[in-house]
Image: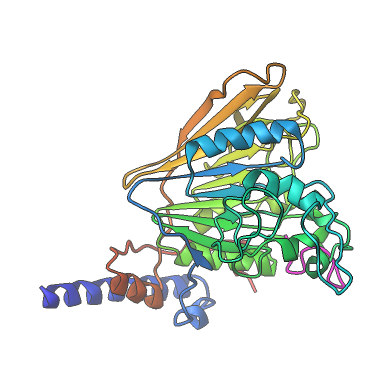
Amino acid sequence: MFRGRTLALVVVAVTAVTALGDLGARDGGRVADAADAPCQGADATVPVGTNFTFAAVGDFGDFPAAGRVAGEIARWQPTFVATLGDNAYNPDAPTNGVGGFTFAGSKIDRGAGQWYWPWIGAYRGAFGSGPAPDRPSRFFRALGNHDWDATPGGAVFAALPDASYYTLPGNERYYAVRAGDVELFVLDGDPRSVGATGGRYETDGVGADSVQARWLRDHLADSPARWKVVIVHFPMYTSASRGPATVLRWPFATWGASIVLAGHEHQYERLQGPDGLPYVVAGHGGNALTAAFPGNPAPATSVVKVGGQYGALRFDATPTALTMTAYGQPAATPSAPFTVVDRLTVPVAATQPVRTACVLRLAVQGATPVTGAHRLGPVDTP
């Protein structure tokens, strides 16, 4: 039995090395130096069962409708909650006079902690059972423009209330979280970061050739997860009035993503990107809604549009499928139940690990590697 497994491992490793060799030959050897680099793993892992549920919600803050959406999410009993940005609107956190923040009574605590304290790691706010310093992180937020526009802050992450309020993996601005066969890739996509100097906004950039984009490319390529969910605040395709953040039109499909989730626009829309991936805009988590869709989403195609309803996304994972269900409640009828407005079976990620280090890691973990060429995108050009 052991000999058979060893032989299978050797075959897989040889296949991976062969794929890398062919890839290097086609790409002028640019990937050769990365062939033996450490496999890029997730920044955090959430223990889950065979079947589990998680939620995604965007643009909520300190609004009555946000409480109703949070109540619906709590009813789902999700293992963890991911956010699509604008978790609090221009939040404050008063200082305690000795360089620390006082979270009780702060706008950041009212905007996020009031609704989601059971999932917030190392919670120090005033809601629910109060401070819980030993609670693990089960609330994975993306930064939105209003999170960046906090007081104090000055568009410097370390000075934001957000940086002290949350305990998150990685550099806390963008990071990867693994849960069973699902992996989240949370990005910081504020377009004001383009060309920023002096440490303002996202210092690792937001363009397709940025440090952050290279991080995503490498982590997507090395992840053995079946479903790879990219999360960012600003939509790169939308029919809404504020329009797309075109700087974020990275080659997500080429790099191996399954789906891209965004917020910012206060309504629900699902689109099919020109790359074939589903792109979901779900910024209807609590702030004032916008009901119209005046824009042209080309080169994407709008599949489902739902305006005038508050809601969130529910994801149900099983060994064979990841299902996204979008829920909505009419803004004009706050006593109405939340109902299903859209449902999607999330596609399995096309790209699986090929590098030797990743194949060996999968073998040690007892997983079954799926080999295939890492399809290179624009950022592979030096």
Q: Position of residue 342 (x, y in %)?
A: 53, 27
Q: Is residue 263 visible?
A: yes
Q: In front: 141, or 243?
A: 141
Q: Position of residue 173 (x, y in %)?
A: 68, 63
Q: Is residue 245 visible?
A: no
- Residue in view at x 76 percent, y 23 percent: 292
Q: Give the residue at the far left of this rendering.
A: 1
Q: In which quarter of the view is residue 74 placed?
A: top right
How are the residues colored? rainbow
Q: Is residue 203 magenta?
A: yes
Q: Is residue 43 magenta?
A: no
Q: In front: 97, or 329?
A: 97
211 sits to left or right of 53: right
Above or below for 53 versus 153: above
Q: Position of residue 228 (x, y in %)?
A: 48, 53
The span shown in magenta is 196-206
331 sits to left or right of 311: right
Above or below for 120 versus 38: above
Point out the image quarter for the N terminus.
bottom left
Q: Position of residue 377 (x, y in %)?
A: 57, 61
Q: How many marks?
A: 0
Q: In front: 246, or 326?
A: 326
Main secondary structure found in the magenta portion:
loop
Point out the image quarter for the C terminus.
bottom right
Q: In front: 278, or 362?
A: 362
Above or below for 215 versus 340: below
- Residue in view at x 68 percent, y 70 percent: 211
